[in-house]
Image (tube, rainbow, N blue to C red):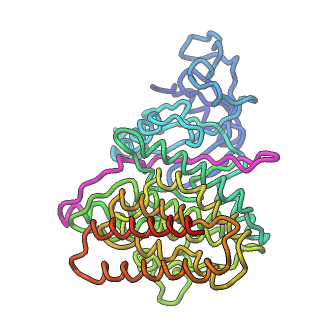
């Protein structure tokens, strides 16, 4: 695909105060610049449907962009779109843009920003005989800004998203990532962060959240089999993955490891934290004397700042902790998160109905569960069992205080004893974890039957 040189000159005129742009056979008028970063600029443009195309010899364009876009829901009612212009200075950058275009064409989901059209043209550089390229990518426009923009504005006013909005934004991001992770082959976004989430405010509803910028998206599964492979991955991650949201295995990769889409789960956990508090859970390290962002991330040293009043439910904090497992092998997958997000909501509702006893509140906490799934060697099946246990131990209204304060703590004490026995030996196996999980689930069900 190409673009005429007259269209290119029109773009330069437009940046300086006027003019139109051709992207293939469609013509757009630049309204204003929306942003810039690196070698890319983003403009608000308006389609001129009845314009004449230079490629068609002056004939009218019937239908304009609507003829090209298959999903008509992506078309703008008023003809406005976002156009990204990328300055390309070498072949490596050219291949990166082509990869971004290819990856974007793989996705079709309401929570992933669609690429509507694109053009890459060659332009003569200032040095004699050399050529550079420029790329033009056309997207739907979302003028309410990014999650980062909204969070920054809210933080300045000491405002916070409601728990409902936090969960709804989070669920939409999960849905978009599920689409990417469940492709064959699976794709990882690799740069999930508030700056790559577009928000559109809707009256009477939670904001619409759309994940964008697939310039870092790659097939998720990578086999690391040497120190050279590990260093190469770390170097790539330092260029493509934002540091405060980068998974530990991308900071310090072992020489023998299987990297997968759970790098996104770490970033998603950081983003959930940022939806609540406006920053990554590890950015505090940048402001501390002698603090190290890498050490804070690798050791999962989370600090919880003051939030809204009333505060966010503890279950939200626990959900973040669950996703921020430093060891990727025991980190949940996107399907686990989507399945158990309703459990997080149930915990919040259940807490409001339960006794105010401080002992009982401590017993409701899932620190014990997180300790279990943080141990090495846990498989996906075992994680699922443990999560099922989380759901089973949610108490229904109406339990007697005697049962709450005696039998239930006793059973958990026995379970914890078995747990520490299994994990105190160097010969622990997957079977130990699974037996322990089943034992706790069975005793929990027996307790509920006793009640």
Please give left or right for residue 220 compared with residue 318 in the image: left
For the point 43% across and 42% down, which residue is it?
Answer: 100
For the point 22% across and 60% down, which residue is it?
Answer: 229
**Which residue is at the front of the view, 53 or 292?**
292
Q: Is residue 118 above or below residue 166?
A: above
**Which residue is at the front of the view, 342 or 213?**
342
Q: Is residue 289 above or below residue 273?
A: below
Look at the image and tell me in which quarter the C terminus lies. bottom right
For the point 75% across and 30% down, which residue is it?
Answer: 78
Is residue 415 shown in magenta?
Answer: no
Where is residue 30? Give x, y as percent: 68, 36
For the point 36% across and 70% down, which residue is it?
Answer: 436
What residue range appears in magenta? 200-229
Is residue 217 shown in magenta?
Answer: yes
Where is residue 79? Give x, y as percent: 71, 29
Where is residue 158? Give x, y as percent: 77, 72
């Amino acid at each position: 695909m190409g673009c005429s040189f007259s269209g290119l000159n029109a773009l330069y005129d437009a940046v300086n105060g006027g003019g139109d742009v051709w992207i293939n056979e469609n013509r757009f008028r630049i309204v204003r610049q929306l942003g810039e970063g690196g070698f890319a600029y983003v403009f608000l443009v308006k389609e001129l449907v009845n314009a004449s195309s230079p490629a068609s010899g002056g004939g009218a364009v019937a239908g304009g962009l609507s003829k090209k876009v298959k999903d008509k829901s992506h078309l703008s009612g008023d003809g406005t779109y976002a156009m990204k212009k990328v300055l390309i200075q070498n072949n490596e950058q050219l291949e990166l843009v082509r990869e971004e275009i290819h990856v974007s064409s793989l996705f079709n989901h309401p929570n992933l920003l669609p690429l509507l059209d694109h053009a890459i043209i060659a332009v003569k550089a200032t040095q004699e005989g050399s050529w550079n390229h420029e790329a033009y990518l056309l997207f739907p426009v979302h003028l309410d800004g990014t999650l980062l923009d909204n969070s920054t504005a809210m933080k300045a006013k000491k405002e916070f998203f409601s728990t409902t909005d936090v969960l709804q934004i989070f669920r939409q991001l999960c849905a978009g990532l599920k689409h990417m992770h469940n492709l064959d082959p699976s794709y990882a976004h690799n740069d999930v962060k508030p700056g790559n989430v577009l928000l559109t405010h809707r009256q009477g509803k939670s904001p619409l959240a759309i994940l964008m910028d697939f310039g870092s998206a790659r097939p998720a599964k990578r086999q690391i089999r040497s120190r050279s492979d590990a260093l190469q991955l770390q170097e790539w991650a330092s260029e493509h993955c934002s540091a405060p949201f980068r998974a530990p295995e991308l900071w310090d990769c072992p020489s023998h490891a299987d990297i997968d889409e759970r790098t996104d789960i770490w970033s998603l956990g950081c983003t959930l934290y940022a939806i609540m508090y406006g920053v990554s859970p590890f950015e505090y390290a940048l402001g501390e004397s002698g603090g190290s962002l890498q050490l804070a991330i690798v050791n999962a040293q989370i600090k919880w700042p003051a939030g809204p009043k009333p505060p966010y439910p503890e279950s939200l904090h626990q959900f973040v902790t669950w996703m921020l497992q430093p060891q990727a092998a025991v980190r949940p997958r996107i399907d686990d998160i989507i399945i158990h997000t309703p459990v997080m909501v149930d915990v919040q509702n259940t807490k409001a109905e339960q006794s105010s006893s401080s002992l009982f509140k401590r017993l409701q906490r899932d620190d014990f569960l997180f300790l279990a799934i943080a141990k090495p060697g846990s498989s996906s099946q075992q994680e699922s069992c443990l999560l099922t246990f989380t759901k089973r131990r949610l108490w229904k209204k109406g339990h007697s205080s005697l049962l709450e304060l005696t039998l239930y703590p006793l059973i958990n004490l026995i379970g914890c004893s078995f747990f520490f026995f299994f994990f105190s030996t160097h010969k622990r196996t997957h079977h130990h974890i699974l037996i322990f999980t089943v034992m706790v689930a069975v005793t929990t069900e027996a307790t509920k039957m006793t009640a």
